[in-house]
Amino acid sequence: MALSRVCWARAALWGSTVNLGPLLIRRLQLGRCGLAWGAPRPSKLHLSPKADVKSLLSYVVTKTKAINEKYHRFLGRNFPRFYVMYTVFMKVPPRRRQVYFPRYHFHSTFCQLPGVLADIQHGSHPAVNDILALRECFSNHPLGMNHLQALHLKALSRAVLLTPHLPTFLLRSRLKNHTTVIHQLDKALIKLGIGELTAQEVKSACYLRGLNSTHIAEEKCRTWLGEWLQVSCSLKDAELSLLLHNVVLFSTNYAGTRR
């Protein structure tokens, strides 16, 4: 188009002294009319809408999964106790998370789990019966010891002061052994009697079971340890995942120890 305007301007100035030639004049005329460029060429790129949608969805799912895993690792590394409760809550089917009626009893203990977790989240210390009512939840999928995922196992390891930097099968094995040892100690301790323990022994026993007893009075420590023993000695071997989680559930809000 710029060449067209230049040539026409020169022709107007020089008149007939410039012979553009019939072919060039024809091209310039076509250019002025906008026909020299012709119709737009059809695109040679053919895309499949279904393939595009599937590709996009796959990309979004992959990115979302990566972000979600990163968020879970952050929670498990920095807030292991919170992450344990968060993971337990997320295991509950969505239709049951808001279902909790304290005056009624349901066959599925999943209906009671959200209520217990919500009470803990709001600062309440659960009663022994509240914990024992959850045994079924922690004996099978998804919260049984053999069904816990890697990030969950890492958070539990941090909560009981074990290293989380091991393969999943070793984390599971160590947590099983740790929980079994505590369970056996609890059975021996309840036979011996808490009254036979010194103040320091009581505080050490509480600390081993997840309670930060440093600034808690001895009498309160004895009370808490007695309640822990009631829970522990009521559990079967298949229910020891609940005892492991009880390190978090039973110690978070006791006597103002919430962190």
Image (cartoon, rainbow, N blue to C red):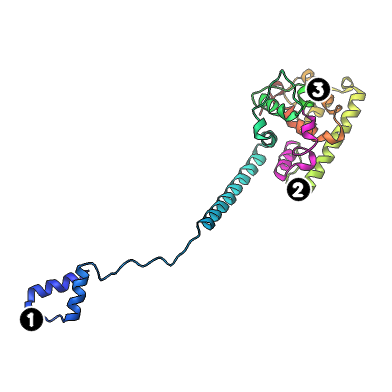
- Is 64 inside the magenta-drawn segment? no
Characterize the local packing of mark 3: few (<14), some (14-19) or many (20 or more) Cα atoms within 10 angstroms: some
Would you say 39 lies left or right of 255 here? left
Sequence-earlier tag: 3 or 1: 1
Vertical comparison of 119 with 236: above or below: above
Residue 241, given in percent of the width and then of the height, sits at 79, 35
Q: Give the residue type that dot 3 points to.
A: Glu
Characterize the local packing of mark 1: few (<14), some (14-19) or many (20 or more) Cα atoms within 10 angstroms: few
Question: Helix, strand or loop at disc 2?
Answer: helix
Q: Which residue is mark 1?
A: 17
Q: Which residue is mark 2?
A: 168
Q: Nearer the viewer, residue 25 or 6?
A: 25
Indicate the quadrant where residue 244 lies.
Answer: top right
Mark 1–mark 2 Cα distance, whole angstroms, equals: 92 Å
Would you say 149 lies left or right of 32 here? right
Q: Give the residue type that dot 1 points to.
A: Thr
Q: Which residue is depicted at the point 79% across and 39% down?
A: 145
